[in-house]
Image (spheres, helix red, strand yellow):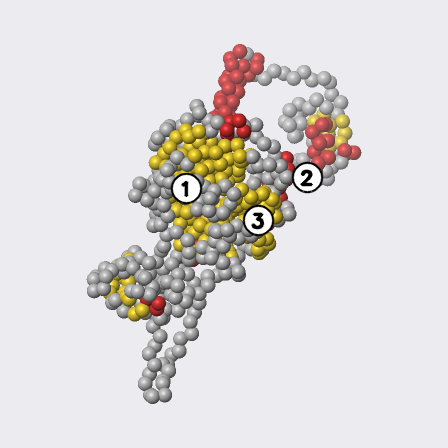
């Protein structure tokens, strides 16, 4: 007798009352609990319909295969074959899964590359769009009458051929998101400043007292000597200089080699600034670009400040506003055919009575090979750009110009977010610097006034007077409380908490201006450049500010134009009106003496 379910001899046989079929008890109990019916006939079945069958104990006979050694070997062989077939199937499944995973990873990598390329193209397109918007000014539309007016004598009046004044550019303004970013940065830096301590690696006073010239590096041209601005990238110990020769030079102090010479400006480079994070580098200049624009669908253009020719000659002109008249001619400038016809300079040139010339700021980006490529050319000022200063977020910067405006830029796109004009009609800004926390901007004017601005509202919130002559430099202390300003007459220290002057240094005679003033990064020392270089120990409102070192101007020109402290004030970089960058420090710390 065999179980109808398993086909084997049951250990506990039971039989169904309804069908009389024999089952193994445990099997039929499980089946009835799950399905409630007979597994053979399909009729409803309960455990009450199951009757146990009494039988003697059965000894299971051995199968034929296990009764002999050859049979057992055959059984083992079959088991081995089955195991190998199962292993082979598993290996095939593993290989297929690996192929699918590899394909999926390849597709993911390809998708990431496509997304990265699209993002790069998007950013480049945005940058080009922003640059195009800067380079093509938006002029205010002029009302043009379709019919010529008729005079009383019946003759038609001549049409006005003069070019109209350019319209005011539309600026997007400093958005709420940018203001939030500036405010968060201010809060973070303010909290960090309260816990900040003077670094133990800062050069001690005794060390600065022994500073002497370590090296001199002729970086600029002999034909147009003079270094006007210096900045240092502390993370790489790289020094940048801006010169009268219209170039900016990036110099590696540790090797004594010039990393790159940046050409592109046509006039002196008045300001250079590294961006602390990243590879960006900013230069401001007094150079001039010619803006060419259509006027009422004709192709007349106005030239000013670039060309020079004598009457009757074929060649460029130089505008002298009240002396020269432009004769008829055609010139080719930057792939444009430029034509003009004889008329007064006041109507055809970009001078005080015509269109203004454009002064530029350039944004450079460093590459892995050490070269710098010009990323943006910013043409928003109409007078010499005197200062460039970078915000603490390293995402924005400000330029200040003699055109009496300062501009707030987004670094990545090069877009001018706001251009702030001073309603007081001064002669323009001669210096500018951000407060370390980033919500305050300080500007010095050509009329000896220092102005403090709220960056969020672009409002003038404070004004410091007392200097004589243009304010040549301003510098905020790292503690956030002190402001140092330099002008033709003196250096003044201001307490930003009480908005008053608490100390004045009258260092030089009336014929020697103070050209530069700079706090070191820790706020412990103050450097001043004029006919020499002087280093002061920073005190307080009541405590004395002691001069701890006076370094001579070794250029022979009597004009040290800029001073900058190195990392931890371990050296001082000085620029003068010759072409040499000079490094002062402790004897024994010499870099290469000449480059």
Reply above or below: 393 against 25: below
Q: Most extreme residue toward the right, as rendered?
A: 48
How far across and how far down the image is residue 282, in percent? Answer: 43, 45
* Residue at 72% in and 38% down: 36
Image quarter hosting the N terminus: top right
Q: Secondary structure at mark 2?
A: loop
Q: Label 2 near label 1: C-beta < 8 Å?
A: no
Q: Quadrant of residue 237?
A: top left
Image location (x, y in percent) of residue 55: 74, 21
For the question of whether residue 222 can be seen, the reply is yes
Q: Residue at x 61, y 43 (%)?
A: 481
- Sort mark 2 into few (<14), some (14-19) or many (20+) by Cα contacts within 10 Å: few
> Distance between the Cα atoms at labels 1 and 2?
113 Å
Percent x, y for residue 65? 55, 16
- Residue 233 in view of the camera: no
Instruction: In the rendered view, tell whether residue 351 sits above or below residue 73.
Output: below
Circle nearer the N terminus (3, 2)? 2
In the image, taking residue 531 as reference, residue 182 lies left or right, namely right
- Real-space Cα distance between discs 1 and 3? 31 Å
Identify the residue under disc 2: 42
What element does badge 3 sit on? strand
Q: 25 or 93: nearer the eye? A: 93
Residue at point 51%, 27% (across, down):
207
Q: Quadrant of residue 10?
A: top right
Q: Which residue is mark 3?
A: 440
Question: Of the numbered discs in the image, which one, if any, rests on residue 559?
Answer: 1
Q: Residue at x 36, y 85 (%)?
A: 151
Q: Secondary structure at mark 1?
A: loop
**Residues at marks 3 and 2, CA–CA distance in whole angstroms:** 90 Å
**Mark 3: few, some, or many residues within 10 Å (few <14, many ≥20)?**
some
Whichever of labels 1 and 3 marks the residue nearer the N terminus, that label is 3
Q: Residue furthest bottom?
A: 153
């Amino acid at each position: 007798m065999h179980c109808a379910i398993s086909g084997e001899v049951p250990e506990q046989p039971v039989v169904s009352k309804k069908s009389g079929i024999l089952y193994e008890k445990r099997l039929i109990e499980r089946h009835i609990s799950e399905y409630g019916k007979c597994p053979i006939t399909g009729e409803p079945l309960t455990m009450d319909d199951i009757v146990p069958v009494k039988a003697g104990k059965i000894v299971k006979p051995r199968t034929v295969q296990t009764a002999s050694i050859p049979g057992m070997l055959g059984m083992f062989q079959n088991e081995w074959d089955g195991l190998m077939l199962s292993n082979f199937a598993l290996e095939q499944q593993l290989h297929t899964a690996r192929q699918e995973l590899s394909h999926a990873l390849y597709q993911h990598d390809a998708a990431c590359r496509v997304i990265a390329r699209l993002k790069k193209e998007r950013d480049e397109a945005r940058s080009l769009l922003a640059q195009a918007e800067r380079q093509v000014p938006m002029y205010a539309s002029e009302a043009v009458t379709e019919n010529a007016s008729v005079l009383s004598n019946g003759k038609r009046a001549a049409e006005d051929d003069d070019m109209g004044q350019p319209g005011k550019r539309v600026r997007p303004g400093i958005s709420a998101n940018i203001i939030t970013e500036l405010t968060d940065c201010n809060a973070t830096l303010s909290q960090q400043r309260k816990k900040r301590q003077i670094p133990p690696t800062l050069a001690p006073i005794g060390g600065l007292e022994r500073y002497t010239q370590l090296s001199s590096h002729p970086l600029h041209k002999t034909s147009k000597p003079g270094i006007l601005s210096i900045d240092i990238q502390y993370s790489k110990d790289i020094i940048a200089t801006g010169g009268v020769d219209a170039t900016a030079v990036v110099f590696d102090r540790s090797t004594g080699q010039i990393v790159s010479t940046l050409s592109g400006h046509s006039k002196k480079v008045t300001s250079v600034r590294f961006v602390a994070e990243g590879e960006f580098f900013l230069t401001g200049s007094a150079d001039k670009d010619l803006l060419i624009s259509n006027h009422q669908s004709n192709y007349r253009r106005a030239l000013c400040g670039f060309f020079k020719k004598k009457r009757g000659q074929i060649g460029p002109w130089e505008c002298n506003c009240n002396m020269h008249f432009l004769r008829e001619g055609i010139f080719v400038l930057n792939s444009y055919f430029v034509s003009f016809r004889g008329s007064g300079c006041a109507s055809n040139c970009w001078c005080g009575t015509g269109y203004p010339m454009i002064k530029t700021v350039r944004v450079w980006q460093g590459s892995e090979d050490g070269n710098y490529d010009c990323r943006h050319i910013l043409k928003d000022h109409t007078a010499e750009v005197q200062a460039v200063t970078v915000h603490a977020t390293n995402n924005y910067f400000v330029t200040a110009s003699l055109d009496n405006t300062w501009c707030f830029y987004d670094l990545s796109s090069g877009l001018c977010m706001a251009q702030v004009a001073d309603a007081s009609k001064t002669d323009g800004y001669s210096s500018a610097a951000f407060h370390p926390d980033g919500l305050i901007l300080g500007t010095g004017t050509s009329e000896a006034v220092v102005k403090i601005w709220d960056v969020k509202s672009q409002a003038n919130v404070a004004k410091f007077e007392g200097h004589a002559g243009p304010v040549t430099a301003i510098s905020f202390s790292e503690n956030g409380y002190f402001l140092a300003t330099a002008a033709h007459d003196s250096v003044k220290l201001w307490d930003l908490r009480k908005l008053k002057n608490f100390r004045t240094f009258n260092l030089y005679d009336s014929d020697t201006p103070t050209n530069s003033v700079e706090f070191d990064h820790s706020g412990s020392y103050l450097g001043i450049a004029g006919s020499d270089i002087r280093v002061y120990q920073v005190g307080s409102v009541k405590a004395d500010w002691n001069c701890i070192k006076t370094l001579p101007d070794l250029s022979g020109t009597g004009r040290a134009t800029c001073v900058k402290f190195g990392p931890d004030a371990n050296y001082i970089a000085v620029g003068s009106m010759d072409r040499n960058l000079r490094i002062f420090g402790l004897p024994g710390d010499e870099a290469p003496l000449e480059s």
